[in-house]
Each structure stands twice: as structure tokens, then as C-alpha cells.
Image (cartoon, helix red, strand yellow):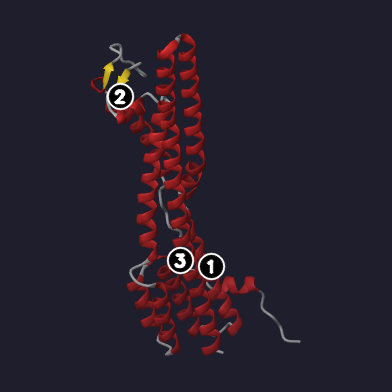
């Protein structure tokens, strides 16, 4: 019976060229704090500016009791203390949309992924590994990085004599898997904020609406006649600003989350195809 060499022995004879990438993620906790703070500043000092009301509250403070909004925008102020939180959620969504857009755009690389893989396959078929590596330098991005790591191991395995073909293929596959494990977390990082806000923003909007309705019906009980109907209609209108902000923020978060996950799926497919290309090429050319 032929002796089989365990995979662990293969790993011990080959060293990985993949190095962990150190990336800070301070934006994940700093951005929500800054955005909610900015939301309060916008609500309190811009939308809630005393000049925007016919009966401003001269005492000011954290939550001035202004009345008689002059503009549609200033009526949003009367929606209550949930409004600045919703504005902060909206700003947080915009922040992470821009951040993910830049990251995923960089990870996609400089050219079409399918065309890049075809060029690498052509060079490998001609046993021109250096040309394939050059294509990775041109492509860049996550697929290019994974392919380059695999090609370096591919080139190393060509000259290795103490392993059989199957073990060399396993070594290449292991290198690709290690490179992939470093690239994928970078792509998916911070998407949890978009998915969370997509759910929470709607609930916050409903909470603000309920609080506004409570205030409106409370004012209705303290007055009577035509004045009561007027206060009720104004209170309901102000309360619904919370719903509008919550639903709008949630809709944007859901749309952008789906766009980003679709793009990440395309990159992931390209990475999987890269690994398959390298192992199948080596197995067929260097038996």
C-alpha cells in the first residue's frame, strides 16, 4: 500500500506569504456618536432657531418650547426629542454608505474581474507565471490580492521536489484560503450598522409619533372648541414627521445594504473562481 503524507506535514513544509493586515476601525464607534451629536446641533440650533417661530421660548435650554413654526422645516423641530436621534441615524447611514462605497470600490480593483481571471488563465496555460503576477499588480483589489498570493505559492510549488502533485495543490489551496480569510472581513465590515439602522430607524420613528400623539391628545384635553381641533391637527402633523424621517432613513439603509451585499457577492465569486483556476491549472500542467 502506498504511503500517504498527511496535510499537516504538507503545511509544515510550506510557509505562507500571506501577512495579516492591520486596519483600525475607530469609525465604527466614533461615527454614530458624532452623527447623533451633529443631529442634535442641527435640530436645536438650525431647525430650532428662535427666528423660525412666532412664539419662541426665550429661556432656551436643552429643549426650548417654541411655538408657531413659520416654515415646513421648522415644524420638524416640534416633532420632539426623537427627531435629532433620527437625524443622527440618517447621518450615520450616509457616513457608512460613503465609507463602504470607497472600500468596496477599492476592493473591486481597476478592471473587470472576469476579464482579469481570463488573462491569468491564458498566462498560466502558457506556463508564464510572472506575466500572471503582473496582471495581479495591474488589477489590484481583493481578487488581485488573493490571486497574487496563490500565484506566489504556485510558482514556489513548481520548483519544489519533495511533495507530490496532490500535496502541492493542497498547499496552493491553503494559501488561497488564508488570503481570502484576510480579505472578506474587510468587505463585510460595518455593514451591520446599515442593517441595524434599517430596522431601528422605523421603530424610532414610530416611537416619536406615539410620543407626539400623546402630547397632541393631552393638549386636546386641556382646551375645547375649535382651538382643540386646531391643536390636535397640528400635533398629529408634527408627530408624523418622526414617521417620515424613520421610514426614509430605513429605506435608504436597506437599499444601500442590498447594493453593497450584491457587489460583495460578485467579489467573493471572483475570489472563489481564482482559487479554482490556480488549483486546476497546476493539477493539469504539473502532474
Placement of 118 over or under 94, stated as above or below = below
Q: Quadrant of the C terminus?
A: bottom right
Query: Badge 1, how many Cα within 10 Å: few under 14, some, many 20+?
Result: some
Q: Secondary structure at mark 2?
A: loop
Confirm whether residue 286 shows in the render. no
Could you say where residue 251 lies in the image, as x and y percent from the top left? Answer: 45, 46
Q: Residues within 10 Å of mark 2 (few under 14, many from 20)?
A: many
269 relative to 160, above or below: above
Between the residue at mark 3 and the residue at mark 2, the CA separation in whole angstroms equals: 45 Å
Q: CA distance from mark 1 to mark 2?
A: 54 Å
Give how far apart the Cα atoms at labels 3 and 1 are.
15 Å
Sequence-wise, the earlier of marks 1 and 2 is 2
> Residue 100, relative to residue 234: is it above or below?
below
Q: Quadrant of residue 21?
A: bottom left
281 vs 83, left or right, is: right
Q: Which residue is mark 1?
A: 177
Question: In this view, which residue lies farthest toward the right?
Answer: 1
- Relative to residue 197, is residue 50 depicted above or below? above
**Residue 128 left/right relative to 73:** right
Q: Which residue is located at x 46 percent, y 59 percent?
A: 20
Q: Which corner quadrant holds the N terminus?
A: bottom right
Residue 213 horizontal/vertical position (percent): 49, 23
| Viewer-proximal residue among 126 and 60 | 60
**Residue found 42% across the figure and 52% down from its top:** 256
* Secondary structure state at the residue bearing disc 3: helix
Front one among 136 and 268: 268
Q: Which residue is mark 2?
A: 48
Work out whether mark 3 precedes mark 2 in sequence or the reverse, and give the earlier one.
Answer: 2
Q: Which residue is mark 3?
A: 267
Amino acid at each position: 500500500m502506498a504511503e500517504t503524507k498527511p496535510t499537516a506535514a504538507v503545511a509544515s513544509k510550506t510557509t505562507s506569504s500571506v501577512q495579516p493586515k492591520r486596519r483600525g476601525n475607530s469609525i465604527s464607534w466614533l461615527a454614530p456618536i458624532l452623527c447623533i451629536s451633529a443631529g442634535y446641533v442641527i435640530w436645536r440650533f438650525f431647525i430650532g432657531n428662535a427666528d423660525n417661530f412666532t412664539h419662541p421660548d426665550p429661556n432656551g435650554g436643552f429643549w426650548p418650547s417654541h411655538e408657531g413654526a413659520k416654515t415646513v422645516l421648522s415644524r420638524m423641530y416640534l416633532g420632539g426629542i426623537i427627531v435629532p436621534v433620527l437625524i443622527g441615524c440618517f447621518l450615520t447611514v450616509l457616513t457608512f454608505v460613503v465609507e463602504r462605497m470607497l472600500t468596496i470600490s477599492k476592493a473591486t480593483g481597476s478592471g473587470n474581474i472576469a476579464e482579469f481571471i481570463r488573462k491569468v488563465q491564458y498566462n498560466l496555460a502558457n506556463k508564464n507565471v510572472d506575466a500572471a503576477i503582473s496582471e495581479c499588480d495591474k488589477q489590484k483589489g481583493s481578487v488581485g490580492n488573493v490571486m497574487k498570493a496563490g500565484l506566489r505559492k504556485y510558482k514556489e510549488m513548481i520548483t519544489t521536489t519533495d511533495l507530490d502533485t496532490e500535496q502541492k495543490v493542497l498547499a496552493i489551496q491553503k494559501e488561497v484560503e488564508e488570503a481570502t480569510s484576510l480579505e472578506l472581513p474587510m468587505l463585510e465590515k460595518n455593514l451591520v450598522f446599515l442593517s441595524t439602522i434599517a430596522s431601528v430607524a422605523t421603530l424610532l420613528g414610530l416611537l416619536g409619533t406615539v410620543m407626539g400623539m400623546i402630547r397632541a391628545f393631552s393638549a386636546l384635553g386641556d382646551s375645547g372648541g375649535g382651538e382643540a381641533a386646531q391643536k390636535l391637527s397640528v400635533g398629529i402633523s408634527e408627530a408624523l414627521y418622526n414617521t417620515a424621517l424613520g421610514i426614509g432613513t430605513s429605506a435608504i439603509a436597506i437599499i444601500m445594504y442590498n447594493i453593497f451585499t450584491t457587489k460583495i457577492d460578485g467579489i467573493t465569486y471572483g475570489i472563489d473562481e481564482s482559487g479554482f483556476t490556480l488549483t486546476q491549472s497546476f493539477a493539469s500542467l504539473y502532474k
